[in-house]
Amino acid sequence: MSDQTRFMLNETDLPKNWYNVLADSPIPPAPVLNPMTKEPITPEFLSVLFPMEIIQQEVSTDRYIEIPEEVREIYKLYRPTPLVRARRLEKALGTPAHIYFKNESVSPVGSHKPNTAIPQAFYNKVAGTKAMTTETGAGQWGTSLAMACNFFGIDLEVYMVRVSYNQKPYRRIFMQTYGAQVFASPSERTEYGRALLAQDPDNNGSLGIAISEAVQMAATSGGTKKYSLGSVLNHVLMHQTVIGEEALKQMDLAGEYPDVVIGCVGGGSNFAGIAYPFLRQNLKDGQRTRLLAVEPTATPSLTKGAYTFDYGDTAQMAPIVKMYTLGHTFMPAGIHAGGLRYHGMAPSVSALYDAGYIDAIAVSQIGTFDAALQFTNAEGILPAPESAHAIRVAIDEALDAKAKGEKRVILFNLSGHGHFDMTAYQSYLNGELVDYEYPAHAIEEAMKDLPQVAVEA
Amino acid sequence: MSDQTRFMLNETDLPKNWYNVLADSPIPPAPVLNPMTKEPITPEFLSVLFPMEIIQQEVSTDRYIEIPEEVREIYKLYRPTPLVRARRLEKALGTPAHIYFKNESVSPVGSHKPNTAIPQAFYNKVAGTKAMTTETGAGQWGTSLAMACNFFGIDLEVYMVRVSYNQKPYRRIFMQTYGAQVFASPSERTEYGRALLAQDPDNNGSLGIAISEAVQMAATSGGTKKYSLGSVLNHVLMHQTVIGEEALKQMDLAGEYPDVVIGCVGGGSNFAGIAYPFLRQNLKDGQRTRLLAVEPTATPSLTKGAYTFDYGDTAQMAPIVKMYTLGHTFMPAGIHAGGLRYHGMAPSVSALYDAGYIDAIAVSQIGTFDAALQFTNAEGILPAPESAHAIRVAIDEALDAKAKGEKRVILFNLSGHGHFDMTAYQSYLNGELVDYEYPAHAIEEAMKDLPQVAVEA
């Protein structure tokens, strides 16, 4: 066991491959369905939205997919990221547990999202794409894709949930510094957005609506624009496995191996990114690392949702996938962790959770911010509210180990910093935050709107 | 020469000593004067504001001062910081020059300021200080000292320039997450502040005024509160030399040695931090690295100011030092680089510039933001407007090398990121920025308010 605090890798240790969990998953993936025909989707349908290399990665069952040299060169602007032993937090908690975190907040935009934005922009560049569209909630994803598209000379339109567009002007400006065009969603630019605004000119928007608009802009562009998604899909989660692959090497430098790996889940990509390489070791070497996904009590898709086929977006234009879902019509409570408000969950995370390979837990908003400031006081870094969900559970694990007098090695993913979340922290400091519980019978209500599909759910 | 992009050091390479340029400076330092008596200051006077260890460091001529183990432990939360070769920027410029930057933006607060905040809080803790005061302009310094005081359980009052307090609520909240109390300056809490508000209730404040208030609160606290300054003084600049000491080792890893080292200057600390270790090598080994300080044309203390004795603050309560100054009554133009608006300059930087050991250049606001976005487009990182001054000159050096067909090794200090400067970037993107020139005869006018001192200027 090392007495160091930070475990750094050299550039030469940057992973050469992404890890594809589908190669090892004990559960065959459910088919992805066309939202109109409800039949298994064809590459032709997907090719309207994505370049062929992305589509191939989405359905691949190869265990490893090589990271292109052009992508690795850009990863090197911020990767490998540090693995940090939170010694001061351990001391503050008085725990015998060892707490490690992977610091993804050091990327230029402050989160893990560039790990997939960069390859997605690259594959589009190779395919000749000149313009792309995407949605963003709080702005982490939009900023990441804006940076990546800028690197490869691709124009980008971002549909930003209107309430965030108005409340978070800094994120909007950040995207604009990378040359992106940012529109409040619902917008006047799409048929769907115009219809919503006609009903309610003050519509605040939602991530589901923004996805619908970004998809519609690409689908109706006559092939001139492609679409990009920042979570949920297999290829996105796979790109994020650079986090876990590095963490495996760094835990080795630390001379320890985690008993539990923790990540917050919205769509599931940062959790999968750190957890899947450890899942591989569980399956291969018989390791017994617990993989723990953390979601808000306000949007508990894994712990309270149904495992069934549902639309990926509100307007029923995105593919239908089998996932844990609160229903595509779900309107999330106004929690500050904007990245965790999605109604569904990545199909691979859903399948592995259903089969018992990963665990999940839901935590409340106020407890999450308590943990965030405990972390800040000890380690200096102010975390993103999303990441604070993982911190809450890491602290709970450390306190549980203390209560039981056990040594425990805890690893969590610090997916991003909170420099753009100051209004959330102000609400917390002012005692204005509230906790939201998902209503007991809401899930039954939500299930009435599910798509009717022919395949077995 | 290495083909790497980022040059990382291990924790064991973290410097064990700060470098004190006064040991090697060819110019004996001018005396520091008591603002009331105009006589050389006594340790007793200083001890009202600072703990004895800080005072001893301020006047020390020892070449190296050991970094306490407790400080090194906290440095390890973010140090050693990366040295990065800006390969993509080089390519975009088509220059044969090699451009390196030291990335101080990776600290938890996003700048180099914790390098001195942490030891200052530590020495106060050791001396039994329970509460501290300081001022902040845009908020970088206040946030850093808030973090450091929080680590050592010291209460902190921050006097924040009122215009920034109102326009930059995110920085204020950031300080509050570390437990600091933040007051808009001028405030009702000090005699000086009350007097200013009585004259003009809408007084926007200035850094000089905020310094006066923070000093007054400590000086009239009956010994219960100490004061801390984030730049200008010898001990502050010395603490920042961890930057240059690391950079020396990292340039060695890169297999190159800089022809020019560039940093922006407000009070002078980040520039001195990176440059002084290279100055030592110039003096010792006969190296010929050009050390280049960059200031805004709006506040050109080195290139347009007078080298003379002046007050450190507006209210004439801070010590009188010999420095390049625009006059302590100088009201800076509203440039966005809030950290570069100070009327004076660190005495050691002033003396070394006067004697020709370092060079200086002034750059305009719009050209600076042009350079900032050129850097962002290539390297992904959005720089602080202050740091962008160094980038402007690094790019100009690279283009000059290109024009002359010369190889040139350029090193600049990226003192911070621009995550809290989005309104500045919005102004730039909207074409609303203006350039400010320092009026030709303003310096003669300003010199009328200088203190009358007995010692020779």
Image (tube, coloured by chain):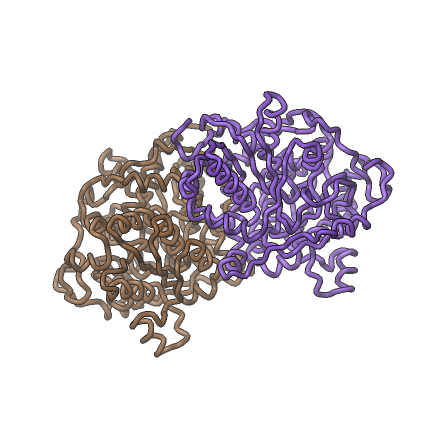
Chain colours: A purple, B brown
Left or right: B428 as drawn, with respect to A234: left
Total count of labels: 0
Left or right: B24 as drawn, with respect to B8: left
Note whether residue A130 is visible: no
Q: Nearer the viewer, residue A388 or B284?
A: A388
Q: Nearer the viewer, residue B260 or B440?
A: B260
Q: Where in the figure is residue A407, as x and y percent of width and height?
A: 46, 31
Q: Where in the figure is residue A436, as x and y percent of width and height?
A: 63, 55
Q: Quadrant of the N terminus of chain A?
A: top left
Note whether residue B120 is visible: yes
Give the residue furthest to the front: A404
Q: Where in the figure is residue A430, as x and y percent of width and height?
A: 50, 62
Seen at 78% across and 64% down, the residue is: A199
Q: Nearer the viewer, residue B199 or B289?
A: B199
Q: Is residue A392 above or below residue B421?
A: above
Q: Quadrant of residue B223?
A: bottom left
Q: Where in the figure is residue A231, as x and y percent of width and height?
A: 66, 41
Seen at 24% across and 70% down, the residue is: B449
Give the residue furthest to the top: A285
Seen at 59% across and 21% down, the residue is: A285
Q: Quadrant of residue B15?
A: top left
Give the residue furthest to the bottom: B199
Left or right: A117 as drawn, with respect to A40: left
Q: Quadrant of the C terminus of chain A?
A: top right
